[in-house]
Every structure is written in structure tokens, then in C-alpha cells.
Image (cartoon, helix red, strand yellow):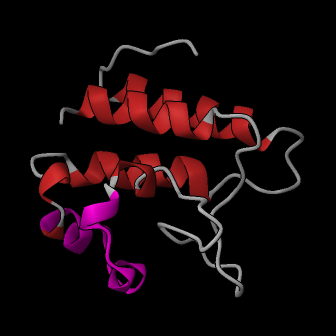
Amino acid sequence: MTEQEAYERMRAWLGREGASKSENSAGLCVYRKGDGNKCAVGALIPDEEYDEDFERQEIEDVVNACPSLDGLDVVFLRYAQGAHDNVTWQEANFSAAAVTRLDEVALEYGLEVVSP
């Protein structure tokens, strides 16, 4: 997977109707939540590669454990993850705010910004 492909997948996930922050009961951001919600990076992890232990690991460790993420720039993924994690609930439209921030990351990495 390229950064462009990763960006497009994350954008589609964050831009879907009803998108919300992926947090656990303590309010901490998680790759996957029990209700099926995922963060931007969590949306890239195939079900067969996901492990609940990822929730206690740094992104570098998750990338190393997931063959489908192999070769992706960890710094890019960290910024993309922040596009999701740093959007507050107070923002009127979580999905639009997260997508806007993700688009900004894509531009910084020289990726082609896509429309929904």
C-alpha cells in the first residue's frame, strides 16, 4: 500500500456518514472500538491482522506487526492519526473536521487530495 492509497482509505473512513471519534471508556483514542468504530490508522488494519494488543502499542510496533502496512511512512501515519485524534467533540461536524485535517496532512506529503 502506498501513502496515497492509505490516505484515500483513511479519508473514506473518516468521511463516512456517522463518523465519530474512536475512544475507549477512559476517553483515550484507540485503533478499534468494540462498536466497530476505528481511528484513521485502525481503518487500514485488515481484520485478520488486527490484535487487541495493538491498543497498548505505539504506531511503529503496529506497522511492524501488520504486513499490509509494511512500507508506509510511520511519521505520515502518526500525522494522519492525529488528524482524527485531535478533533474535538465540540466541533460541529467531526467528520468534516477530521477529513479537512487529513487533507492537510496529504498536502504536506505531496499527495493528491481527493474528493468524496
Mostly what secondary structure, the magenta segment? helix
Does residue 105 sit above or below 40 in this rendering? above
Q: How many marks?
A: 0
Residue 29: % across, % down? 58, 71
Q: Is residue 54 left or right of residue 2?
A: right
Q: Residue at x 58, y 36 (%)?
A: 101
**Residue 55 is inside the magenta segment:** yes
> What is the quadrant of residue 26 in the picture?
bottom right
Asked where in the image residue 59 lies, by quadrant, the reply is bottom left
* Residue beneath the point at 36% across and 13% down: 112
Residue 79 belongs to the span the image colors magenta: no
Question: Vertically, is 62 above or below 109?
Answer: below
The spot of residue 94 in percent (x, y) is: 76, 44
Please report the residue visible at 11 percent of the width from the left and 52 percent of the height from the top: 70
Q: Which part of the image, by quadrant, shows the N terminus? A: top left
Is residue 40 positioned above or below 17 on the image? below
| Residue 74 spot, x, y in % from top left | 23, 54
Span shown in magenta: 47-64
Relative vertical location of residue 95 with respect to residue 108 in this rendering, above or below: below
* Residue drawn 61% across the image and 59% down it: 37
Residue 3 image point, x, y percent:
25, 33
Residue furthest front in the image: 48
The image quadrant where one finds the C terminus is top right
